[in-house]
Amino acid sequence: MAAAPKSNDAVIEARSLRIAAIAKDVLFTAILAFVVLGPILGLKTFSISGSLALEQRWGLVAVFAAIAAGGRLAYHLLVWKGPQARPSKAATASALPVMNFGKYIAPALLILAIALPFIPGVDRRIVDLAILILTYIMLGWGLNIVVGLAGLLDLGYVAFYAVGAYAYALLATIYLPAWFGDGIVPWAFFITLPIAGILAALWGVILGFPVLRLRGDYLAIVTLAFGEIVRVVLINWSDFTGGPAGIGAIPRPSFFGLPFIEGEGGFAAYFGLDFKPIHRIIFLYYVILVLALFTNFVTMRLRRLPVGRAWEALREDEIACRSLGINTTSTKLTAFAIGAMFAGFAGSFFATRQGFVSPESFVFLESFIVLAIVVLGGLGSQIGVVVAAIVIIGSFEVFREMNFLKAVMPAGFDPVQYRMLAVGVALVLIMRWKPRGFVTRREPSVALKEKKAIPTDLVAEGHG
Amino acid sequence: MTIAGQDALLRVEHLTMRFGGLTAIGDLSFTAARNEITAIIGPNGAGKTTVFNCLTGFYKPTEGSVILTHGDGKQFLLERMDDFRISQRAKVARTFQNIRLFAGMSVLENLMVAQHNTLMRASGFTVTGIFNSPAYARANREAIGFSEYWLEKAGLVDRADDPAGELSYGGQRRLEIARAMCTKPVMLCLDEPAAGLNPRESEDLNGLLLNIRQEQQIAILLIEHDMSVVMGISDHIVVLDYGEKISDGSPAEVRNDPAVIRAYLGVEDEEEAEAVVERAVAAVAKKPAGQKMAAKKSPTRKKGVRK
C-alpha cells in the first residue's frame, strides 16, 4: 500500500494477508481476555444460609472478551497500520480512497436516501431518525458556507435556525390566518418557507455587520453571544413569542393542499390509499430531503461562481483579497446571509415537523453539534458533512438501542445517560487521528486540464 | 527620463505618513510615467513599503495627495479611496513583500479570484450565474483563457492545476505577479519581487517585467534591493532615506549621486563605495524573506550614521 507502483494483484494479496493477520490477532485477544477474566468475573461466590455457593457468569465474561476484541480491532484499523505501512507524514496513500469515496459513495447515498422509506423493514422510527439526520445535514451544509468556505467561525448558528422556526410558527398560527383566512393554513408551510429563509438571511446580515472587523476567537465569542441573545429574547418576549411555554398547535404540512387526515378530502382518500399515519412522516422525509439537496446544489454552484471563490480566497488571505479588488465586507455578509438562509429553511421545517417550538430547542448545544459535524466532516467538504452527521446523530440514537447493556451493568444503568460522554470521547479520538476531519482533500472549483485534489494541509482554516 | 507634470500616470505630491511620533514618510513627491519601470530604492526602513501601502490604500496618508490619471483622462485621488476600490476602479495592482497567495487553492483558481469583479458582473452578481447563464459561461471561459495567457507568460502553465502552495519560491513570486496582472491594471506595484530568488530566477523575472512593460503598456513601480534587477530594468529611480527623497533620476544619474552613496555606505570615496555596494547587495539578495527583519539590524546604515 505504501509503494505506489505495486501491481494491483500484489496490493490485493497484501491486503488479504493483513486481514488474516488482524483476524488472528483479534481472535487471540478474545481468547486471552476470556481466560484472564474468567476467574475474575465469571465466578462469583455468595453465601446461602451460612454455606458458600458459586455463581457462574460466563455471559458477562463473553461480553467483556468481545469488548476487548473490538478494542483490538479498532486499534488495528485506526492506529497500527502494520509493520510495512507507516506512511511518512502526508497521507498521500489515503488520497485515492477519499476521492473514490466522494465519487461513488455520494451517488450510492443519494439512491439510498431516495429509496429509504420503501425499503422493506424500514419503520416509522427509522424514517424519523433519517429526518433528524437530514435536518442536521442541511444545517451542516449551511454552516459549511460560513465556517468551511469563508472561514468565519460561527458559534451562534442556532439563532438563525430559531428565527426560521419562529417565523413559521408565528406566521402559520397567527398572522397568515388573520390576514388571509383559515383557508390558507394547509399552504402555510410552502408560503412561509421562503419568508423564513429571507428573515433568517436578514438576521445573518444584522449579525454580520458588527462582526465584520472581528477575527478568530473574538468572532466566535460574539457569534456565541448572538445565539444566546436570540434565545433569551425568545424566552422573555412572552407577548410575541409565547415565552418559555413556546408556540403549540403549529399546522402540520399538507401534501400541496391535501391534509394528512383520515376520511374525505385527505391525502389517503384522494389517492385511494388506506389511511396510515406514516404517510405524513414519509412526506416530511421527502420535504427535508429536497431541502437538503437544494442546499447542496446551491452550495456546489456557488463554489464555482466568483462569490464562492471569493469566500474561499477570504479564508486563505483577506489582505490579498482586498488587493485584488474584492469587497471583503459584502463577501462576508453574503456568506453570513446565505448560510443563515439555509438555517432558516431548516428551522421552518423543524417547526412544522414538531408542531411545537420553544426556546428549549435552540440552546448552544445545537450550535455546537452542527459545528462539530462541519469540523468532523472536514471543513468545506460536502460529503464529509453527510458522514459526520450520520456518525454523530446516529450514535446518539444508537445509545437508545443498547438495552442489552442494562443486563450486564449494575442496576439503574441507563445507556442513554452516557451518550454525550461517549460522543465527546469519540470526537476527541477522531480529532486526534484525523485533525482536519474525515475528508482531507479539497477539490478545486475550476481546472485547466484535470482537477487535482488539494491536500488540506495547504488549505487555511480561516482567521475568523 | 522623468516626465514632469500632467503627462505622468501617477503623481505623488507632498506625501507624508506619520505613525504617532514617527514620520515614516516626510513630504515625498515623485511621478511615475506610463510604459516605464520606476524603482523605489533605499536602505532598510527607509519607508519604501509604507509608500506602497499609501498608494494602494492599505494606509491612509497623513498628508499629501496621490493622483492617478488614466489614459482617457479620468483622475483618481488614491489617498481617499478604499483599498479594494483602488484595485477595482483605479486599476492599481500590487504584490507583497512576503508572498500572499491563496495557498490552498489551485494556481488557476488564484488567477480566477483576481478576475472577481469582471466575473461578478457577468454572473449578474450571482443571481443569473447560479443558473449558469450563457453570459456567465462565456465570461468564465474567457477568464480561463485570460488566466492561461498569463500562466504562459509566467511559465506556470504546466502547474495550472497544482496547489499554489506547492510551487517553488520563484514560481510563487511569478504567480503573484501574474495574479496581479489578471486584474488588468494600469499600474503594477511590486514589493521586492526578486527577494530570495536565485540568479537564474532573478533573470527570468527581469524578462517577465520587461515583457509586461513592453506589451501591456503599463507603469511598473518596483521596490527592490537586488541592484542587478534595479539597474538592469529601471527607467527611473527614486531613492528614499529616512522617508525622504534624496535622489530621483535615471539609473546612471542615481548611481553617481553622492547623496545616494552617502546614504547607502556613509563613504564618499567612489571605488570603496562600489565595493561595499556589491557586498551589501549580494548579502541582501541571498537572504530569504523570513530574515528580512534581521536584515534591518545590518550595519549598512549604521556606517552612514556614524560618519
Image (cartoon, helix red, strand yellow):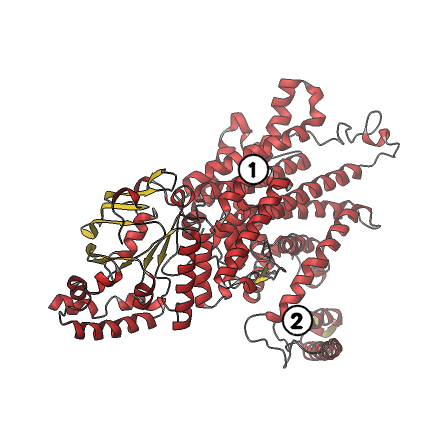
Q: Nearer the viewer, residue B41 or B234?
A: B234
Q: Residues within 10 Å of mark 1 (few under 14, many from 20)?
A: some
**Can residue A234 be seen at all in this image of the molecule?**
yes
| Residue A193 x %, y % | 64, 33
Question: Which percent across, then down, holds residue A360?
Answer: 56, 39
Query: Three-letter amino acid code at disc 2?
Result: Leu
Q: Which residue is mark 1?
A: B124
- Asked whether, in this view, residue A175 is left or right of residue A260, the answer is left
User: Can residue A151 be seen from the camera position used here?
Assistant: no
Q: Nearer the viewer, residue A344 or B231?
A: B231
Q: Type of residue at label 1? A: Gly
Q: How far from the left and from the top, in percent, is residue B83? A: 37, 45
Image side of residue B3 versus residue A307, left or right: left
Quadrant housing residue A29: bottom right
At 61% from the left edge and 46% from the top edge, which residue is drawn?
A299
Q: Rounded to the nearest whole Å, what is the CA distance between mark 1 and mark 2? A: 49 Å
Residue sitting at the far bottom: A83
Camera-side residue of B300 and A77: B300
Image quarter (top left, top right, bottom left or bottom right) of the N terminus of chain A: bottom right
Residue in the picture at 22% in, 57% down: B240
Task: Give the number of the mark in front: 1 or 2.
Answer: 1
Secondary element at image label 1: loop
Determine crowd level at label 2: few under 14, some 14-19, many 20+ residues with C-alpha closer than 10 A: few
Residue A332: image location, x then y, percent: 47, 44
Instruction: Give me the chain letter of mark 2.
Output: A
In the picture provided, is A460 more to the left or to the right than A299? left
Give A384 or B215, whichever is nearer the viewer.
B215
Where A213 sits versus A19, above or below? above
SS for callout 2: helix
Question: Any mark on residue A77, and which?
Answer: 2
Residue B208 position by quadrant: bottom left
Relative to B115, say whether A459 is above or below.
Answer: below
